[in-house]
Amino acid sequence: MTDLALRRAPADRERMLGLLQDYGVYAGVTVLILANIAFTPHFVSAENFRTQAVQVAPVLIVALGMALAIGSEGVDLSVGSVMALATSLVSLYLGYGPWIALIVAMLGGAAVGLASGSLIAHIGVQPIVATLALMVAVRGIALVMLPQLKDVRDPGMATLGSGDLLGIPYLVLIAAALALLVGFTVRRTTFGRQLLAIGDSRPAAQLAGLPVRRVLILVYICSGVLAAIAGVLATARLQASDPTSLGNLMELSAITAVVVGGTPLSGGRIRVGGTVAGAVLIQLLTATLIKHDLPPSWTQIAQAVVIVLAVYAARERGKR
Amino acid sequence: MTTVQARENTSSPAEEEPHGAARAERLSALAQQHGALVTLMLVVAVASFGFDTFLTGDNLENMAVSSAFLAVVALGMTFVIVTGGIDLSVGSLFALGGVLAAWGSQYGTPVALLLPLAVCGLIGLVNGLLIARARLAPFIVTLAAMLAARGILLSITDEGSTTYLVDEKSFFARLGQDKLLGVGVPVWITVALFVLGAIVLRRSRFGQYVYAVGGNEDAAALMGAPVARTKIAVYTLSGLCAGLAGALNAAWLVSGVTILGTGMELEAISAVVIGGTLLTGGFGFISGSLVGVLLLKVIQNVINQIGSLDSAYQQVVSGSFLAVVVIAQTWLGRRRRML
């Protein structure tokens, strides 16, 4: 009797923690929205929703790439620097038209991804270190290309940054489309399944004959391209290229969004919907604290607590 | 550079060796241990021929003092990395330590030194507990601590707008600025700490546990090593080192500058890795980290000497250098395993 009760109690606890990991982020977002509706003046306005959504878009796009890297049991610390590289490339190539500039920026991101992916897949360097080296070097390259802040005046970029379609900003539409694309890739494509298999167990994937190296390189190329797109969108929104500060600490926000969204750091599982909600949660948390005149330092401490709680919930799940 | 050197060594037609494999392994290990030192000597040699201003007393003194603070941080980081972990919070703790020391210096030198040690050591302890007891991933825990420590720093300095000053005549300020035999006191403290650290890692029981935990955690636990306690100790130690480095830096600058330390965790990790310590844990040495710090600072100094190049090139060089070293290490490590 006691034996049974003892055995059941941890199972219940595990199920609760599993639920917390899977749906906690949605509950968090709901609670924050309800609390804001109740206590924050001027929260429920089209204007405010628009601001929040536009601000969250670049973070979300970077987080999607990060989710792929984390799902393959890696991590990509170079994303913030890739954003800086993209903003430098955009302002340098804008003379040839916004589309060319966008493509060059994405190629830049892909090149960084190819470099980190090759280091990880072919040479066997740990993802943290490989992307750390690129994070330092790529920020430098971005600054060599464009040593200081430069205004970006281009009608195409201005439309991209502040225009909208049927009342929804382009930035939000692009982020949503990319989220759907990544979600589809993870669930329905061979690449997605191979990526999850590798994240689950790389030796097993290797023995099963999966093209481990190719898939890993592709993962980091995807992450680089997504970060470059985020960099271009941020440039369009700010109407300026600032390779010194653009994307600073972006890797932190992206990792937080992914982890809070229920994707385990141990790989083998990617929750795209959770990542979207995770990015929204962090944005709402920041906005709530700022709206209530709490200093930015509190936001950082709050974000730290949220990260640790999210990883803690994920840990209990992983032990099962 | 390490790779090239290893290749030359292994292909050199030396006297006949009955145990070729063992010899090759010894050479790989040698390259891993001393590659950074050889590179450092080469860079120094080239720099002193290339620039008249390189080997002057002022320039050397500058490099020594500016290396000292990073070196103390890298010392703690070495212990963490040998256990197979990583500590990303040290940059924030360095800044926090500096601000706390500058604030505390109005109550005397003991407070100025003990307060940053206590607070940063406590944050390191929390990191260690979360990593060892709750079994969370080191990089995510210390990432959170990096945010939290920066947040604490901002909240005690009115969001970074208040800079606490150290009285220039106080004993604490002299600790940072005085010279002993022509060399700054922080440099002496750093040297003493490195000697102590090397003895602890090499000769003490705790040091052996650190290697054992990094080599194979399960084996270490079966062997009876206190795995959790060792991990908690290294993260606490790393916090203490970062706090102390911050305090010494504040004494040197006679103020608690709030914007310091961003990116310092990367510099410290780079220095440790360049010094030959493996990020996979279980292998590494204190002296290598000191060489790594010096190498980074000498390269920075050379780039500054060139003058026309700005700090952006410095980042490109540091990043590429780190990549080359890691590639060489991975290559050497694989060789050693295969042999």
Image: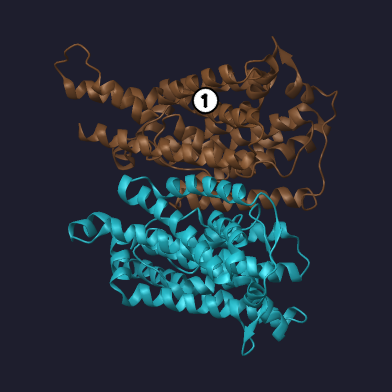
Chain colours: A cyan, B brown
Residue B281 image position (x, y, % from top left): 38, 37
Q: Looking at the picture, does residue B166 appear above or below residue A69?
A: above
* Picture residue at 31% right of the left edge, 36% below the top: B331
Q: Is there any visible trace of residue B241 in the rendered image?
A: yes
User: Which quarter shows the N terminus of chain B?
Assistant: top left
Residue at image location 35% in from the left, 69% down from the top: A11
Q: Compare residues A183 and B311 and report the one nearer the observer.
A: B311
Which is nearer the eye, B320 or B17?
B320
Residue pictured at 63% horizontal, 54% vertical: A243
Q: Within 10 angstroms of label 1, few (less than 14), some, or many (20 or more) residues?
A: many
Position in image of residue A98 (x %, y %): 58, 70
User: Badge 1 sits on which subunit?
Assistant: B
- Amino acid type, callout 1: Leu
Closer to the camera in the image, B191 or B112: B191
Furthest-bottom residue in view? A166
Q: Is residue B191 above or below residue B299?
A: above
The residue at which mark 1 appears reads as B290
